[in-house]
Image: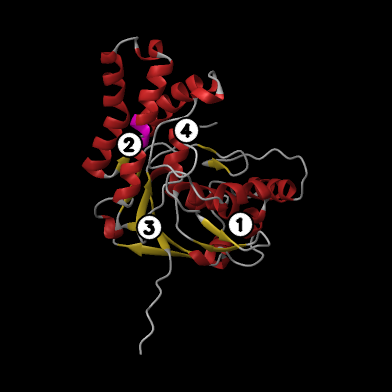
Amino acid sequence: MFSKEVRETKVVVKAEATFYAALLECSPALLSTTRGLTIEKRALGTYLVLSEAIVAPQSLFTRYLKYGHSRQVFGTEHPLYGRACVHYNDMGEPQAINHFNTRLLLAFFEVQLALGFAGPAFHRHQKAIEDILAGKQSVLETNYYNPFTHQDNVGIHYVYGPEEMGSGYGQADWGKFLRYSEWAMRRAFALSPQDFGGTEEGLMRALAQYPGGVSDAHARDGSIPMFPIRHWTKIVSHIFQNKSSANRAISFPEMVGEAVYIPFVDCLLDMPYQRDAVIVFQSVCGSK
């Protein structure tokens, strides 16, 4: 009787543009001693291969995952996708990565690697994280993602399937994301048609931009254009925030539990990658 092989959960990040420049500033000692992280040269490209072993005992990233708010973000079953990113035991300790997603990657880059920080700036960055984890007040400077306020700074990026072919998102998850986006946009129009020009034609133009334009771009070359997602997240979030809780519900039958509004950007950051997906961070949105 043969045991079934269990493949390790992995994701590959291709270093380009500003992300590559930030990687060059990262401490070589930190890169070589961080468990679950290897750097590979393939042709002319530089790739970071991350496995679930990044949840290593006593690492800064693992201690960050044990932080109360982090457990809520990464250990809670997502209402749209029906599963949690990280598995925690009954003691609140992270045990394994169920799947990678953009939010987890960005948190790892900021917490464990402090990408883009070198010399004294690197030490200030790491001390600020240690202070926050210890319950102290501290100002944390970030480049890509604030792991405590969960504000990201990522612009255009790409999520490919293994070997950079096809989509790195599961078809069912990507479909849910698009359908949820349309349902939420239509609900926002019903609540505040003036934000869409006051006409059905205005709603159709908005839907053509989002989720339509985002879907078209991703189908064409795997890119995720963040501008329309951020733009409509801001508008729709404002509409829902100014309505009573009874009016914030979205009639979306595929969501787990109560169908309350979740910002579009958050849904994208939390969408699970397929195993061995390849991610390219082409740009960031600019300095915060």
Which tag, 2 or 3, sits closer to the chain's start?
A: 3
Separation of residues labelled 4 and 2 (CA atoms): 14 Å
What residue did someone put label 2 on? Answer: 179
Separation of residues labelled 1 and 3 (CA atoms): 23 Å
The quarter of the picture where the N terminus appears is bottom left
Residue 61 image label: 1
Task: Kindly check if marks 4 and 3 are in contact, taking CB atoms under 8 A apart as contact.
Answer: no
Separation of residues labelled 2 and 3 (CA atoms): 35 Å
Helix, strand or loop at label 4? It is loop
Q: Between tags 2 and 1, which lies in front?
A: 2
Coloration of the structure image: secondary structure
Residue 50 image label: none
Separation of residues labelled 4 and 3 (CA atoms): 33 Å
| Residue type marked 2 | Arg
- Image quadrant where residue 216 sits: top left
Mark 3 burial class by Cα count in 10 Å: few <14, some 14-19, many 20+: some
| Main SS category, magenta section | helix
